[in-house]
């Protein structure tokens, strides 16, 4: 079981959050509190940090933080929490999403996230709601499963179809090694392109937790919750979530599409965000924390309120 989670791209994250001493900040993915600790160090006495996590076990890691009067923790899915805050008319100066799983979750076989150790095929971040990976895999049809594997795990289509057929043939699946063995039987593997089970497990996890749906809704809520000048920072770990964040930001940059000969803009372009540069972990971080390998940090500054109709 993991005893710690190393916060990914901590210095780059703090620089992109660009905190002032009185800022109100949301850490939407508290995990083990690594980023939260860095954020609190940057805030003054008048600052505030609201941390969120949907995994009930994350709440158990907040006791040290709750002694700090500037810190609040909300247990729940970030899309619901951010939407509720925005609906209450609250405003914040910065929001951080450090997406995916913490080492506490990956390294605990009982959670079912890891293909390395046997455990129940669960994979829910919040086991009190939704359906487990086993329930999903034992009822989904092969065509839909193949789509999930290619869309959420970047599994090549042919491989995805073979894995899906093998899963259906082997039902019922109960433990992580049942899924691992199905992948191995379907696609085998030589020492190339990494272990295909990694991408299959990722895809199933993303689906079971509706990770992309939740992230899309959370980004929309963030747009309302941030004050003008506020900073949005997201660390992504796979192409599906990275694409979603990238498209969200670029879709709100309000690029003017008027013909260049027009002296003023008439197309109604109205930028809501200005994007920052995309960053990757340094060579040193990659050596110290190989789990950071696929991380991409995207950031944006809110420049104006979104149009009332959300369009
Ligand atoms: C990569 S970890 C965050 C690690 C943290 N930044 C740190 O330094 O310790 C991601 C965390 O986000 C949580 N999480 C993922 N999706 C979530 C969601 N939709 N709502 C709330 N929390 C979520 C997970 O339970 C996990 O604890």
Image: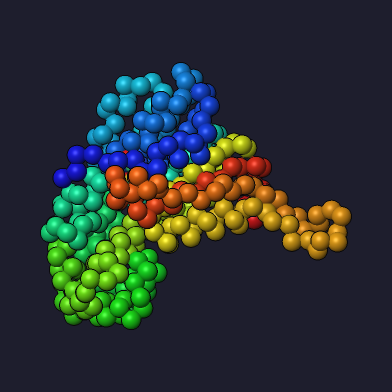
Q: Relative to 280, is 225 on the left or the right?
A: right
Q: Looking at the rendering, in which quadrant would you find the N terminus?
A: top left
- Furthest toward the top, the residue is 45
Q: Quadrant of residue 239?
A: bottom left
**Residue 82: image x %, image y %?**
47, 42
Q: Position of residue 90 (x, y in %)?
A: 54, 34
State the residue at coordinates (51%, 30%).
Answer: 19
Task: Tell me the residue at 25%/46% (across/down).
Answer: 103
In the displayed structure, would residue 70 be above or below residue 222?
A: above
The quarter of the picture where the C terminus appears is bottom right
Left or right of residue 92, residue 183 in this image = left
Question: Where residue 56 sits in the image (x, y, percent)?
Answer: 27, 42
Image coordinates of residue 86 in percent, x first then y, are 53, 40
Vertical relation: 246 (above or below) 158 = above
Q: In the rendered image, is residue 144 in sight?
A: no
Task: Give left or right: position of 254 versus 57.
Answer: right
Ligand 1 falls in quadrant? top left
Quarter of the figure with residue 136: bottom left
């Amino acid at each position: 079981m993991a005893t710690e989670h190393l916060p990914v791209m901590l210095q780059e994250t703090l620089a992109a959050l660009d905190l002032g001493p009185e800022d109100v900040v949301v850490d939407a993915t508290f995990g083990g509190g690594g980023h939260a600790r860095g954020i609190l160090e940057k805030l003054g006495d008048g600052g505030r940090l609201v941390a969120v996590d949907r995994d009930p076990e994350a709440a158990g890691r907040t006791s040290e933080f709750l002694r700090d009067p500037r810190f609040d923790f909300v247990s729940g899915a970030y899309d619901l929490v951010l939407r509720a805050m925005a609906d209450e008319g609250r405003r914040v100066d910065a929001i951080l999403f450090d997406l995916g799983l913490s080492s506490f979750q990956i390294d605990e076989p009982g959670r079912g996230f890891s293909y390395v150790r046997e455990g129940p095929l669960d994979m829910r971040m919040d086991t009190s709601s939704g359906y487990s990976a086993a329930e999903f895999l034992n009822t989904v049809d092969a065509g839909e499963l193949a789509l999930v594997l290619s869309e959420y795990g970047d599994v090549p289509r042919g491989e995805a179809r073979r894995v899906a057929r093998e899963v259906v043939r082997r039902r019922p699946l109960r433990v992580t090694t049942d899924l691992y063995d199905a992948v191995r039987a379907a696609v085998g593997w030589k020492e190339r392109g990494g272990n295909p089970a990694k991408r299959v497990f990722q895809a199933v996890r993303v689906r079971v937790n509706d990770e992309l749906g939740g992230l899309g809704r959370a980004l929309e809520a963030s747009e309302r919750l941030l004050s003008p000048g506020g900073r949005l920072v997201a660390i992504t770990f796979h192409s599906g979530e990275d694409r979603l964040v990238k498209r969200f930001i670029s879709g709100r940059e309000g690029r003017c599409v008027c013909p260049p000969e027009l002296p003023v803009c008439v197309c109604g372009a109205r930028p809501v965000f200005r994007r920052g540069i995309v960053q990757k972990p340094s060579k040193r971080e990659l050596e110290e924390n190989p789990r950071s390998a696929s991380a991409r940090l995207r950031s944006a500054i809110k420049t104006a309120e979104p149009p009332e109709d959300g369009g």
